[in-house]
Amino acid sequence: MASSTSTDPPPDAPPASRSVELATVAEQIAAIDDLIALARLRIRVFDQDLSQTGWNLPPRIDRLSAFLRGPRGRRLDVIVHDTNYLETACPRMLKLLRTHCHAMTIYRTGTEAQGATDPLLIVDDRHYLHRFHFAQPRSTMGIEQPEQTRLLANRFDEIWATGEPGINATVLGL
C-alpha cells in the first residue's frame, strides 16, 4: 500500500491562521470573496454604502445566496451610513434581501455611529477584513484570527446597536 506524502489539510480542516496587508480595492474585493467562501454561520458588514467593493456583482451575489441557502441559522447583517446606493444601484442585493429576508438585515447607522469611518467584514467571529478608512484603500485581512476578530466584532456590535431600519425586504406604496 502506497503512503501519502501530501501536506494538504483534510477537507474540513480550518484554514491556516494568517494576517495579510492589502493595498488596493481590487485586493479587498478578492479578499471579501475569499472570506465569504469561509463563512459557515454569520457574515457581518459595515460600510459607508457598499459602493466600492463589489457587493452587487453577480459572482458575489451568487456566493452570498449560496451561503444563505445553507443550513438553518445562517445570517447576513449589513449596516451602512447611506442606503441610497443600495436602493438605486444594487438590484441584485435587493433581490437577495427579498429572497432571504428571514436571514438577512440591512440597517442604516444611527447618529451615534455616523463618525465611524473604518469598514468591517466579520465572518464567523474568526475571520475579518478591516479597512482603515473609507477614503484610503489600505486594509488588513485576518483568517483564523479569533482574538483580533473579537475586537473588531465588538466594534461592529457598537455600530449595529445604533442601527435603524435601512431597507425592508418589501417596498410598500409603489
Image (spheres, helix red, strand yellow):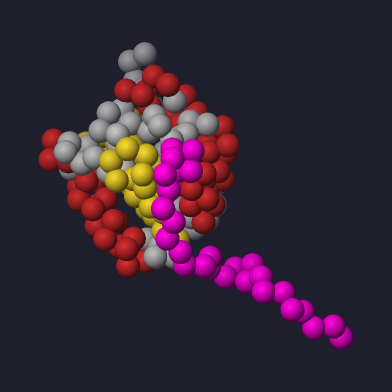
Could you say where residue 145 lies in the image, as x and y percent from the top left? 39, 65
Decide if residue 161 is in sight here.
Answer: yes
Above or below, 42 against 138 in this view is below
Q: Is residue 109 magenta?
A: no
The answer to which quarter of the image holds residue 1 is: bottom right
Q: Residue furthest bottom?
A: 1
Q: Which residue, as the protein is rendered here, is positioned at the far front?
A: 23
**89 displayed left or right of 166:** right
Determine the residue positioned at 42% across, 44% down: 23
Q: Is residue 162 above or below residue 41?
A: above
Farthest residue, direction left: 112
Q: Which quarter of the rendered picture does the C terminus lie within? A: top left
Q: Magenta part mainly helix, strand or loop? A: loop
Q: Which residues are magenta?
A: 1-29
Point 51% across, 56% down: residue: 38
Residue plotted at (24% across, 57% down)? 154
Residue 2 included in the magenta stretch of the image:
yes
Q: Name the outermost residue toward the top.
A: 174
Between 142 and 39, the one lying in front of the other is: 142
108 left or right, relative to 85? left
Q: Percent position (x, y) of residue 159?
A: 22, 46
**Quarter of the view holding residue 146:** bottom left
How far across and down, in percent of the image, does residue 62 sit? Answer: 57, 39
